[in-house]
Image (spheres, coloured by chain):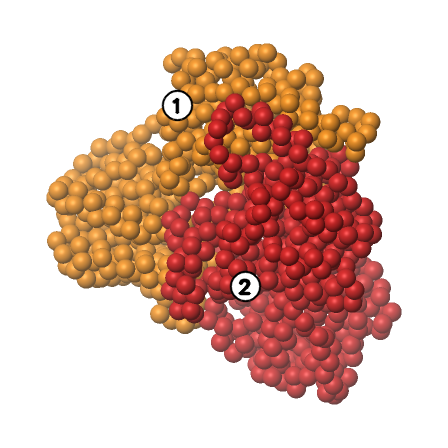
Chain colours: A red, B orange
Amino acid sequence: MRIAIAQLNYHIGNFAGNLQKMTAAIETARGQGADIICFAELAVCGYPPRDFLNFDDFIELAEESIARLTTLSKDIAIIVGAPCKNPVIEGKDLYNSAYFLAEGRVQYIQHKTLLPTYDVFDEYRYFEPANTYRTIDYKGKRIALSICEDIWNVGNENPLYTVCPLDELMPEEPDLIINLSASPFSYKQAEERIRVIRANVERYNIPMFYINHVGAQTELLFDGGSVVMGPQGSLYAELPYFEEVIQTFDLQEVISNNKSREQPKDKIALIHDALIMGLRNYFGKLGFSKAILGLSGGIDSAVTAVLAARALGPEHVTGILMPSAFSSSHSVDDARNLAQNLGMPFEIIPIAPGYDTMLSVLQPFFGDKPFDVTEENLQARIRGMILMAFSNKFGPILLNTTNKSEMAVGYGTLYGDLCGGLSVLGDVYKTEVYELARYINKDREVIPENSIVKPPSAELRPNQKDSDSLPDYDILDQILFTYIEKQQGPKDIIALGFDEALVKRVLRMVNINEFKRYQTAPVLRISPKAFGSGRRMPIVGKYLS
Amino acid sequence: MRIAIAQLNYHIGNFAGNLQKMTAAIETARGQGADIICFAELAVCGYPPRDFLNFDDFIELAEESIARLTTLSKDIAIIVGAPCKNPVIEGKDLYNSAYFLAEGRVQYIQHKTLLPTYDVFDEYRYFEPANTYRTIDYKGKRIALSICEDIWNVGNENPLYTVCPLDELMPEEPDLIINLSASPFSYKQAEERIRVIRANVERYNIPMFYINHVGAQTELLFDGGSVVMGPQGSLYAELPYFEEVIQTFDLQEVISNNKSREQPKDKIALIHDALIMGLRNYFGKLGFSKAILGLSGGIDSAVTAVLAARALGPEHVTGILMPSAFSSSHSVDDARNLAQNLGMPFEIIPIAPGYDTMLSVLQPFFGDKPFDVTEENLQARIRGMILMAFSNKFGPILLNTTNKSEMAVGYGTLYGDLCGGLSVLGDVYKTEVYELARYINKDREVIPENSIVKPPSAELRPNQKDSDSLPDYDILDQILFTYIEKQQGPKDIIALGFDEALVKRVLRMVNINEFKRYQTAPVLRISPKAFGSGRRMPIVGKYLS
């Protein structure tokens, strides 16, 4: 039996586009001699469809796609994910299902059992869990069909769940496992995924075909990396990351050939590639091609510019240099050098006229109150206004360049440097931004060395340095990581050896700035715990604040 | 037996504050001769605690509060909601529980069974459902204890659920039902709540004591309105809306006295009071006392100003009038009259200097490109910048004045009139804003009549009217309500008689503006379906867009 994996980039709600893509993939798989083609979880509608699922109209469109795919299943079987109405009145209205289509008919529908409802996942908001299981016989082979999270409770050892769906199927002695997934990227996920697939394969001693989404859905990035694993746990194939692929595998060959090949999983390289895909798809799926961003001469805007240039082409990314009275001359040079290195257009627009006018407009009201955060924010907001004016007049989307460390502690101006349609680095700690910059510069100096080595500064008052108001980033980032990613509280963090007063100050900064994060752009998610839908915190709370 | 209901306003994560409030309530109840005092769902930590629940430290603080309350239970029983660790490894780590404390000991813990995971609720993200049930015997009476949603599956007729927790308890023949709730306000909720309580009481023929939260947690408003219902379904008491109350009831009196009293439930009056509470608590719980907002002379900012003045005191609300070249003279007069009617301070700051300077700064880049949305947005953003400068310099929180109709179709400028820490009217359709204005003016003209009767205009280009780019609000709001609140798709809406092209245009406007709503302030929720955490839509999608 020959099984094709279609690792494709779907578009949420774009039924016609997704169907067209799947139809072409079926043709390709036929050409590769496949007996079965497998698409990913909820492929017909894209993942995650969120509250679109509440619309009957949306579900009907999904059903129409399934009906159309069914007609295409006459000489090739199709396994595809789609929502499925729950015919029973009790329970949620839908299942998250895998359809097995063959000979022009729906042969079987396996619903998903384990519904992730944590971090970015809200599946129990929409779906009823499966409670019946059946294998599928096709061309002399017996298939155990499962959906994403269903394989993440190996031997019932995941404390979140009480059912292990594959255990339920094993009495029927299947020959192979097929898993349709929509498993979002983090820099650890590909490794985790292979570990879990191997644990399943070693438990059941049959091969597994794991089909993942690829592509970005706003903030959620899907890296692909679909897996074919032999019955002894050897990695027969790991499909490329961040690319659409349709590839057909001979089941017998997978079973008998014990070869193992794995792609490199360098954290920074993965983040680099993931962010580029995230940028490209955000623009592509919205129908935009051009980006704009402010270039400060600092490292965050430099890395963002490089990623955008690589995603969209440098000619489609415009940098705006907006020096102020407090900008060093180096800053403009660094920003200009970067733009020239990249071959991207740039403009220099001083903020002094706007800033001075606004100061004079406000002076009668402010009187002789001293320079404070107001004037700092004013500069940032004039920059935001200039960038948004360009965005409105010429149509590019403004990119936000704030990093995760700043986002965490609220070191940024709402409606100023926090403007933008998409936050590129909002899940990348400052220390990781440096690593990204070094990675980008590994072959030649793309980012001016000076942008990397100079002390970080917002340049909003004379001789300002980030270190005036924040701890050193290598300390700060460790505290933030322990609090945000590891979800440990103050006692645990202090026990790691950090200064108590500092820990409390940092955690307080994180918690009192929830209101800023609430209003910032979606953040491309590259870690296991990003700001956004995966981290839901009260704004008006009084905990560690 | 005498039972006290403590309808209190908790603060999320403020364990010390909540405990202090509960301790005082226990004293009050003792003074009222109560045998039992009942607090609301998750009272010790406030509702909804969201991802704070993931922190062991947070759970330990909740446990400490329970331990402290336990020591206070020597001569009065206490029923109180708190998270409770799940001792079983499998399943979620926590239960959402009601503690029964008496004689200085934890006598029983009843966990919640039905975990709402829809709209604003994410309970299955955190909690394992109960699967065991027991009544409590205290002073000769047998109590069936339940938590919020647990009473919302009367006779198992709610299609969302398959268990009816009170059915499980009835074989033990309880004498009364106590329900601890955290049931957020919408203008329909008080009516719904009484209907559901009555359905339970009529099914079991025993009285129910229903204890609700009161107060606002950012966008979620809790109206209180706790209920005591006699065994025949008569409404023995409905506690006040939007107020903290501690009141003790004699069980025998509740059973034997068939009186029924219900508070009026006028939709607009409820919305008015709810928004005032939402404003007051947002400021109070964040430790702020002053607000600022732009006064355009239009109805939205006028209504917002009135609500803010009533919530915080007019002397704590500053209006900024920022006329442009396109503002009518009436606009300034209307805004000034409003401020004077309210007795609130105001300032007039023209935007022309900032606007003209920015135009001249941008002119070399924009060349002879015609006036378009760029220049409109520029005006709105200069206003936003002025308001934020006042906020930064003097400390008031900026209020957002956008209404739900505008928010829905994206009729507003990101980082301009969409600025603000809290959206007061973002869940109030324009047609409802008019009703609110009429309600406010019912006794005297607070809002200048001209602000109510003149055609709505953003005044961002000459002679602009909202109706230039939007359908009439009475049509628009009906389409929006059917799409947003009723979650009906285009076919259903067109079937109601609306023009097909118009429906498609409106739905498209809603869907393509998800990116704007993502970045706007939390919206005080007064309807069953508000923008924010209760409505989760893809940004990069292609559905009806």
Few, some or many residues within 10 Å of mark 2 (<14, 14–19, 20+): few
Residue, disc 1: B314
Q: Which mark is residue A474?
A: 2
Please state the horizontal and vertical placement of residue A259, each as a whole percent of the image: 74, 85
Chain of residue at mark 2: A
Mark 2 and 1 residues: CB-CB less than 8 Å, in contact? no
Residue nearer the viewer, A460 or A78: A460
Q: Residue at x 67, y 67 (%)?
A: A268
At mark 1, the secondary structure is helix
Q: Is residue A108 above or below residue B407?
A: below
| Residue under the image location 55 percent in, 66 percent down | A113
Where residue B195 appears, as percent x and y from the top left, is 37, 39
Label 1 marks a residue whose chain is B
Q: Are marks 2 and 1 on the same chain?
A: no
Residue B55: image quadrant is bottom left
Residue B132 percent coordinates (x, y): 33, 64
Under tag 2, what secondary structure? helix
Considering depth in this image, is A444 or B468 the residue closer to the camera?
A: A444
Question: Which quarter of the picture shows residue A186?
Answer: bottom right
Whether A251 is drawn above or below B139: the answer is below
Viewport quadrant of the C terminus of chain B: top right
- At 40% from the left and 47% from the top, the residue drawn is A541
In this view, B484 is above or below A505: above
Residue B66, given in percent of the width and then of the height, sits at 26, 58
The answer to whether residue A6 is visible is no
**Amino acid type shown at disc 1:** Pro
The reply to whether residue A499 is visible in this rendering is yes
Instruction: Check residue B217 in the rendering and tell me which mark sits there, or answer none.
Output: none
Q: Quadrant of residue A307?
A: bottom right
Categorize mark 1 by other alpha carbons within 10 Å: few (<14), some (14-19), many (20+). many
Which residue is at the front of the view, A445 or A133? A445
Please, what is the three-letter code of the amino acid marked with disc 2?
Asp
